[in-house]
Amino acid sequence: MALGTIDASNTAQIQIPKRSAVRTSDGLLHVVYFDSNVIKHRSSADEGATWGAAHTIRDAGVTTNTPTIGVDSTDKLHVMWHELQGGQYDTMYSTSGDGGASWGGPTVVWDGSALGYNCYYGSLAVDHADEVHIATWANGKIQYKYWTVGAGWSAAYDLSGDADPGGSQQYPQLSVYSDSTVQMAFQGDKAGWVGRMGIRTTTFTKPGGFGAITDVEFEAGFNLDEVAVLVDSNDDWWICFTTRIGGSPVVKVETSGAKTGTHSGVAIGTTRGDGTLTRDRNDNIYMIWDNASDDKKEYKRLDYAADIWGAKVDIVAAGVIGARTNMLGGNAPTDQNIPPENGTDDFGVIYQDDTDLIYNGNATWGGGGGGGGGTRTKFNRARRRPGTVC
């Protein structure tokens, strides 16, 4: 995988921790982003070194943002975003069956004006039956729908849980188990923690709905945020989030199943933020984050078999990129338990510097456990705004 610029308009953005890129079975990489309120798609046939022309998914002349993408077993692309209509943000959805060259008329999944509140920061996942799951944050609650072949969109499910009156459950992130159960991690409060947001998790099963809410971590005195989740091939979940140690942001990892005893609660390092996760075909876990103190993009790799976290590696060294930047998305849809289709363990990250939206494949920075730096290829010039690994 190469390193390249996707676009150079100085206005393109993506949002952490959204899945902003996927790979189809023909080896093409596909990326979605928003550029001056237009939702766009681009693809690369050379591992991210160069990127094709932008395809417009949505240009409604209104504020649009936070797109996220999934792919099913037929290579159909599924995209969700939020759009300001009638004074409230709607949750929108569209698909492409021709590799992104054309897109269907968008569907309104949630109408914010009809509901009377905004829909923000949604997440999308495609399960192993090629059915689509969307969660969104609306009015302090997480709203959830799924799309079934032949039946269309389900009724809305409401996760209010045991939030305090006036409290909130927000920023849902989704990943899929082998039986198509969906794991959802989110930021939320609970009884006794008024005004303090922790990291929580639950499952969603069709058609039954949500399971019990489980607390991952709460800390007195500050909010936990920037949550991301993936499910590995053993059907164990991994969740990363930002907490504070000694007043400094720290990216922390929690896990279920076989690795709980040795790797649950691992603090990756200090002065970190905007973390995300991916894995390779052997379930080696890559924890990738933005170093808020010096704008490095860094990662650690957990050797799953040896049960050892490797040394921290710089993806982008300090001083290479400008001002305050954020680590963004990756390409291989490993959080859906689908290995990279080119027979390798290639994946990448997307991040923004002062001018460009950058794709950086792990072949250039030693994604297997070493290396660093690399050259870059451009998606689009980008403002400093957060985006995820997928």
Image (cartoon, rainbow, N blue to C red):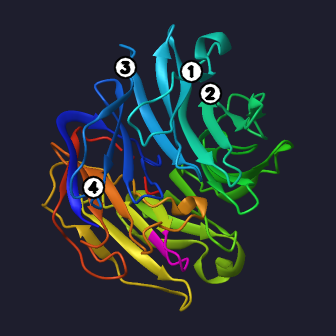
Depth check: give the residue in front, 213 or 129.
Answer: 129
Residue type at numbered disc 1: Asn
Depth check: give the residue in front, 194 or 277.
Answer: 277
**Disc on the earlier residue, 4 or 3:** 3
Under circle 3, the secondary element is loop
Residue in view at x 73 percent, y 55 percent: 180
Marks 1/4: CA–CA distance: 31 Å
**Disc on the earlier residue, 1 or 3:** 3
Which residue appears farthest toward the top when viewing the image? 86
180 versus 189 height, above or below = below
Q: Which residues are magenta?
A: 279-286
Under circle 1, the secondary element is loop
Q: Where is mark 3, residue-wise? A: 59
Marks 1/3: CA–CA distance: 20 Å
Marks 2/4: CA–CA distance: 31 Å
Depth check: give the residue in front, 21 or 120.
Answer: 21
**Disc on the earlier residue, 2 or 4:** 2
Residue type at numbered disc 4: Tyr
- Would residue 37 be found to the left or right of residue 333 on screen? left
Marks 1/2: CA–CA distance: 6 Å
Q: Where is mark 1, residue-wise? A: 118
363 versus 183 height, above or below = below
- Can residue 153 be seen by looking at this rendering? no
Q: Where is mark 4, residue-wise? A: 359
Residue type at numbered disc 2: Ala
**Disc on the earlier residue, 3 or 2:** 3
